[in-house]
């Protein structure tokens, strides 16, 4: 058990100081100041604290060597990612259980936390496959399609019924790099919203919406009581010091650290990055 003492926390363009008690790899308690803490403390008054990120990697399961896998992990860690969302390609409904089991076995060698989803062609999107995903508890499904996919012909209501007890998140993956891509994605999201299916557009770094709809939030992607102690530390770009009365007022200047490389990267009980050194 230890204390992250008075770290600068930037959230929704507001700056505040927060102290976090970490126990058994989880955030156990949060308070602005804990001056009487008697156990081990880490002074973070000159550092900015942020939750670690969730990254989407479609190629991770295809690497053949340990060196390739380690290089991919290092590249993600440099971006502040401690949880990977990887996707297993599925060619037929019958192959799903075996392919998913093989993906689980392969990911046991990964140093990062992970969640495994599947990628399917548009023709396989049916209630029967979604029932299998429910039994296997697959959190997200990428659906590959062309811009001319007939979305109006999809049995959306039956899909929603199949996802009722285990709402896997659907992600449209449009193959064609044309101007029509965004309109197809919007049409897909609109169809899903009408029947209550969880769906998001694809992105490399998952947002809060992705984490919520995949069931990872608030365990991942946030720093709340009960969340995993996955966090990043950044050196301040400027002096964010504020008086007690003004702590919750955003200071002038750029408060967005998301595009910076973190100085340190921690996941529960593991240090993945310290300054220039990346592990493993």
Image (spheres, rainbow, N blue to C red):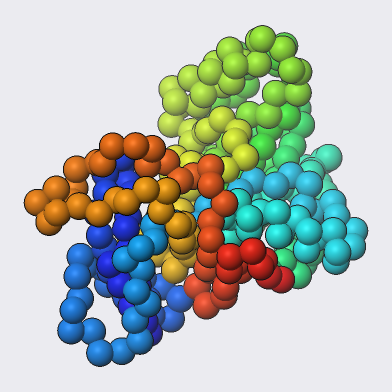
Does residue 78 lie above or below 182 as drawn?
A: below
Position of 149 relative to 241 (above/below): above
Residue at the spot x=42%, y=41% of the render? 256
Residue closer to the observer: 120 or 27: 27
At 84% from the left and 51% from the top, the residue drawn is: 62
245 displayed left or right of 20: left
Please tell me whether residue 233 is drawn above or below residue 54 in the rendered image. Answer: below
Residue 82 in the image, given as x and y percentages of width and height: 58, 60
> Residue 26 in the image: x percent, y percent?
41, 73
Q: Quadrant of residue 140?
A: top right
Q: Residue furthest bottom?
A: 38
Residue 42, compared with residue 174, is above or below; it is below
Viewer-proximal residue, 188 or 201? 201
Identify the residue at image location x=82%, y=40%: 92
Instruction: Give the position of the N terminus as an image quadrant.
Output: bottom left
Q: Is residue 14 visible?
A: yes
Query: Is 28 on the left-hand or right-hand side of 263?
Result: left
């Amino acid at each position: 058990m230890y204390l992250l003492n008075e770290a600068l926390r930037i959230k929704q363009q507001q700056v505040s100081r927060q102290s976090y008690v970490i126990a058994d790899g989880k955030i156990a308690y949060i308070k602005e100041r804990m001056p009487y803490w008697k156990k081990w403390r880490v002074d973070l008054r000159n550092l900015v604290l942020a939750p670690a990120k969730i990254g989407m990697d479609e190629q991770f399961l295809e690497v053949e060597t340990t060196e390739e896998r380690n290089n991919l992990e290092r590249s993600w860690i440099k971006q502040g990612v401690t949880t990977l969302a990887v996707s297993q390609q599925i060619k037929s409904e019958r192959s799903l259980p075996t392919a998913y089991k093989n993906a689980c076995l392969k990911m046991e060698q990964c140093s990062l936390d992970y969640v495994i989803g599947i990628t399917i062609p548009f023709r396989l999107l049916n209630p029967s496959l979604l029932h299998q995903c429910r039994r296997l508890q697959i959190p997200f499904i990428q659906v590959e399609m062309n811009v001319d996919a007939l979305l109006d012909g999809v049995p959306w209501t039956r899909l929603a019924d199949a996802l009722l007890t285990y709402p896997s998140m659907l992600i449209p993956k449009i193959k064609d790099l044309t101007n029509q891509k965004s309109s197809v994605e919007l049409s897909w999201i609109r169809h899903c919203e009408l029947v209550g299916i969880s769906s998001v557009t694809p992105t490399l770094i998952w947002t809060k919406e992705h984490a919520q709809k995949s069931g990872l939030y608030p365990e991942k992607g946030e720093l709340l009581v009960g969340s995993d102690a996955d966090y990043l530390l950044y050196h301040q770009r400027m002096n964010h010091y504020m008086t007690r009365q003004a702590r919750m007022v955003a200071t002038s200047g750029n408060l967005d650290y998301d595009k910076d490389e973190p100085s340190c990267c921690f996941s529960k009980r593991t240090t993945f990055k310290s300054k220039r050194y990346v592990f493993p």
